[in-house]
């Protein structure tokens, strides 16, 4: 099969088209003929040598894909050969075929095609598990997501709005802020011209903040939280370390938590998939939530897709057309 591999740690130029043996399904796994694969920030981190695959996972990048099930391993009853699915992957999505646990597959929602479905797993698993399962966001609460025009951001805005929260977001241009408001954000803050702390505090503070910036944002996030607020960290684009005033955490009863998706157990990911199937897939099928598409690239042009993502010029998801 054709696949894109990381030839050495580095920039987008280290991605190269190659040939690999087709994967075989292990126990409780399926093999998917990939139609489209999603492109995500962790792929770029892996390419740079900063995010190694977990033991036993493919060394190829790609954490989500959509396509047709072509083989099933022992113990698999669903999905079946011939079913169209989208799936969270341990790796290997930048290829014509990929193996993944059957329990991490979800049906393509009604009304969506495979291209749209390939945009769902990584961001929806991440947002649901962190904002709702860990952050406990409830209807009527105030929610702030940084990077609202990213794949994570566009997903978080829509899900929080659909679940009845008041949604605030930050973005890096007026055009991106407008796109966030179109998706349901009540207030979109251009972080280059306005201080999100002041804006959010004027609204009463955020009950939940989803942050992927880290570094200098960490203390500012604590200031922007309402009493009893929850800060959920999912990445550190501007640094893993920060100096924090822990008095705020204690006197205002704040909670700091976070997670990364890829290292979690297969069972933990299966539980997230079950919640998505019950809580979120009906919203997708009803058209109340939808993936936001930015641009499509051919599999052979994965380097250009990574350059697009790392430029931060995109709004929504970037996909590779594989099959």
Image: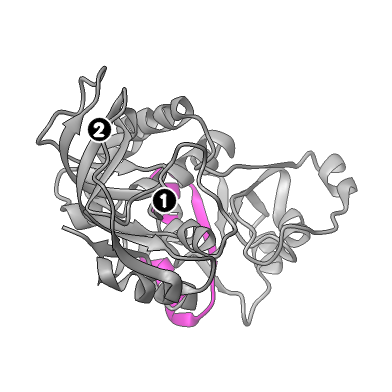
In this figure, which residue is indicated by the disc labeled 2? 30
Residue density around tag 2, few if under 14, some if 14–19, many if 20 or more, within 10 Å? many
Mark 2–mark 1 distance (CA, rounded to whole Å): 21 Å
In the picture, the quarter occupied by the C terminus is bottom left
Which residue appears farthest toward the top when viewing the image?
Answer: 75
Q: Quadrant of residue 87?
A: top left
Residue 117: horizontal and vertical position, in percent? 24, 50
- Residue at the (67%, 54%) spot, across then down: 204
Is residue 107 visible from the viewing direction of this image?
no
- Residue at the (32%, 51%) spot, across then down: 93
Task: Find numbered disc 2 in the image and state the secondary structure of the residue it sits on.
Answer: strand
In the rendering, which numbered label is found on residue 8?
none
Q: Is residue 40 above or below residue 58?
A: below
Q: Is residue 114 above or below residue 15?
A: above
Residue 202: horizontal and vertical position, in percent? 68, 63
Residue contact between numbered discs 2 and 1, judged by CB atoms under 8 Å: no
Question: 267 or 75: nearer the eye?
Answer: 75
Q: Quadrant of residue 95?
A: bottom left
In the rendering, which numbered label is found on residue 123?
1
Please name which of the two marks, 2 or 1, marks the residue nearer to the observer.
2
Residue 207: horizontal and vertical position, in percent? 63, 46
Task: Find numbered disc 1 in the image and state the secondary structure of the residue it sits on.
Answer: helix
Q: Which residues are magenta?
A: 157-182
Residue 170: in magenta span: yes
Question: 216 or 308: nearer the eye?
Answer: 308
Residue 204: in magenta span: no
Question: 34 or 15: nearer the eye?
Answer: 15
Labels 2 and 1: the sequence-earlier one:
2
Q: Left or right? Give the position of 18 relative to 285.
A: right
Q: Left or right? Give the position of 272 relative to 223.
A: left
């Amino acid at each position: 099969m054709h696949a894109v591999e990381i030839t050495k740690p580095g920039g987008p130029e280290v991605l190269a088209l190659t040939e690999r043996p087709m994967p075989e399904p292990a126990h409780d796994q399926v093999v998917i003929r990939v139609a489209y694969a999603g492109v995500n920030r962790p792929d770029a981190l892996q390419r740079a040598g900063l995010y190694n695959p977990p033991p036993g996972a493919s060394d190829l990048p790609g954490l989500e894909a959509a396509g047709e099930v072509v083989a099933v391993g022992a113990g698999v009853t669903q999905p079946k050969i011939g079913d169209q699915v989208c799936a969270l992957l341990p790796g290997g999505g930048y290829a014509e075929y990929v193996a993944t646990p059957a329990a991490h597959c979800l049906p393509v929602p009604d009304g969506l095609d495979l291209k749209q479905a390939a945009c769902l797993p990584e961001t929806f698993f991440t947002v649901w598990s962190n904002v709702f399962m860990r952050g406990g966001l409830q209807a009527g609460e105030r929610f702030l997501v940084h990077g609202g025009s990213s794949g994570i951001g566009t997903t978080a805005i829509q899900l929080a709005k659909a679940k009845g929260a008041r949604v605030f977001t930050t973005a890096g241009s007026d055009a991106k802020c407008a796109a966030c408001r179109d998706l349901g954000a009540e207030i979109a803050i251009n972080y280059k011209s306005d201080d999100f702390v002041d804006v959010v505090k004027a609204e009463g503070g955020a009950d939940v903040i989803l942050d992927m910036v880290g570094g200098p944002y960490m203390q500012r996030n604590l200031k922007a939280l309402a009493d009893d607020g929850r800060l959920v960290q999912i990445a550190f684009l501007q640094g893993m370390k920060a100096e924090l005033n822990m008095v705020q955490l204690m006197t205002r009863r704040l909670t700091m938590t976070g997670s990364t998706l890829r290292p979690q157990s297969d069972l933990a990911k299966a539980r997230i998939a079950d919640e998505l199937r019950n809580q979120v897939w009906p919203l997708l099928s009803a058209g109340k939530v939808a993936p936001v598409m930015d641009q499509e690239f051919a599999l052979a042009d994965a380097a250009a897709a990574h350059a697009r993502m790392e430029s931060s010029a995109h709004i929504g998801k970037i996909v590779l057309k594989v099959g």
